[in-house]
Image (cartoon, rainbow, N blue to C red):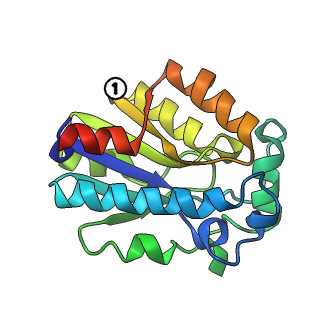
Amino acid sequence: MALWQTQFVMVGIQQGIFGDASHLRQQIESPESIDAVRSCITRFASAVMDGGGTAIHVSIDLGDEVLDHAGRGQAYLQSNGLLASHLPDGEVHSAITSLGTKLTCLRAAPGRNAFRGSRLDDELARQPRQTLVLAGLLIGGILDATCRTAYQLGYDVQVLGDAVLSMGHAERDIYLGVVMPEFATVTTSTSLMAGAA
């Protein structure tokens, strides 16, 4: 796959999650994965934009209601205000904003789905590409909700397994190994960049 054919959507790469002072670092199984995922996402986004593809970041705001079925990950993010767009921790991480003017930044309506209220589908339709690649937060089903909507809208969806953040290994294994393969191809940024070279 050539990167010029790619639309890359990053979901929830926000200060409260990926920042150096994020409270999440004391809660997840592998705190070092925060920096590794952030680095992987910015590297892939740069490669996509340099290759003529599209890169979009969608900010997530979980809103005021915790849904019981969302699990402890979403409840933690919400109770600590880490994904509330009206708070400083909800701001887009500087590693994303530093990618430059080719990057499109959107904000979703409160909830877990990046398509909800963000104009994401309209933005993707402006420059149709063959492949929609997703990366971001597995926590609380955030990326799963976005992936399902993309699939329902008819996109050929790929999820970067090396560019997703989870609370722990079990959550990661369930989403990437069982749930998301129903709607998407799970791959890595390394393999996509190697295939484009």
Q: Is residue 87 visible?
A: no
Circle 1 SS class = loop
Q: Is residue 101 above or below residue 162?
A: below
The location of residue 169, given as percent across then percent down, is 72, 39
Residue underneath mark 1: 154
Q: Is residue 20 above or below residue 154?
A: below
Going by the numbered disc 1, the residue's amino acid type is: Gly
Left or right position of 91 against 151: right
Q: Residues within 10 Å of mark 1 (few under 14, many from 20)?
A: few
Q: Residue visible at 57% across and 67% down?
A: 14
Q: Residue visible at 20% across and 34% down?
A: 1
Q: Nearer the viewer, residue 81 or 188?
A: 188
The location of residue 49, given as percent across then percent down, is 22, 59
Residue 154, by quadrant, is top left
Q: Residue visible at 54% across and 59% down?
A: 36
Q: Nearer the viewer, residue 98 or 196?
A: 196
Q: Is residue 21 visible?
A: yes
Q: How many marks?
A: 1
Left or right position of 85 against 93: right
Q: Residue visible at 60% across and 67% down?
A: 18
Left or right position of 90 against 189: right
The location of residue 182, given as percent across then percent down, is 52, 18
The location of residue 115, given as percent across then percent down, is 46, 46
Left or right position of 21 against 196: right
Quarter holding the C terminus is top left
